[in-house]
Amino acid sequence: MSAPLFHMIAAAPTPVAPFSHAVEAEGWVFVTGQMPTDAEDDAAPLPEGVEAQTRKVMENLKLVLQGLGLGLEHVVVARVFLTRFKEDYAAMNRTYASYFPPERLPARTCVGVTGLARDALVEIDLIARRP
């Protein structure tokens, strides 16, 4: 068994806490939850509304995966965290689903939480598998 690899991706947003963008072990890639922050400007305000925030989160996840030579087609599991579950679930789902072909949807958990960093409405983390 090889040692885990801890990845920081230059093109991805600066983490909001002490963590790696991804950790890889035995072909499994665990991508830390991404926030709807701007990769080029940490101080930029978050986008308005859950749809815009979900798009930004998904684009940030793509940046991390691309930095590892992977894409959304390698994702096997996603976890979604929403601060306004009842109000935002349907809109988040529409936006999230647009990133995956209907025949290749990852397994997923979605939960309501009381708060997220920077008062974000949504955060998503992923597990991917190298081919």
Image (cartoon, rainbow, N blue to C red):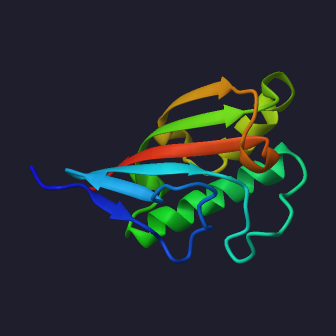
In the depicted view, which residue is nearer to us: 63 or 2? 2
Q: Is 46 rendered above or below residue 91? A: below
Q: Quadrant of the C terminus?
A: bottom left
Query: Percent from the top left, x then y, of residue 109?
Result: 55, 27
In the rendered view, does 18 fall on the left or right side of 41?
left
Query: Percent from the top left, x then y, of residue 112?
Result: 71, 25
**Residue at position x 40%, y 63% from top?**
70
**Residue at position x 48%, y 59% from top?**
21
In the depicted view, which residue is nearer to us: 111 or 104? 111
Q: Is 38 rendered above or below residue 128? A: below
In the depicted view, which residue is nearer to us: 4 or 78? 4
Query: Percent from the top left, x then y, of residue 34?
Result: 61, 52
Classify residue 24 by image quadrant: bottom left
Count numbered badges in the picture: 0
Q: Residue furthest front?
A: 18
**Residue at position x 56%, y 76% from top?**
11
In the depicted view, which residue is nearer to us: 128 or 44? 44
Q: Is 23 rendered above or below residue 7? A: above
**Residue at position x 67%, y 54% from top?**
57
Q: Residue furthest left?
A: 1
In the rendered view, does 65 fall on the left or right side of 130?
right
Query: Percent from the top left, x then y, of residue 12?
Result: 57, 69
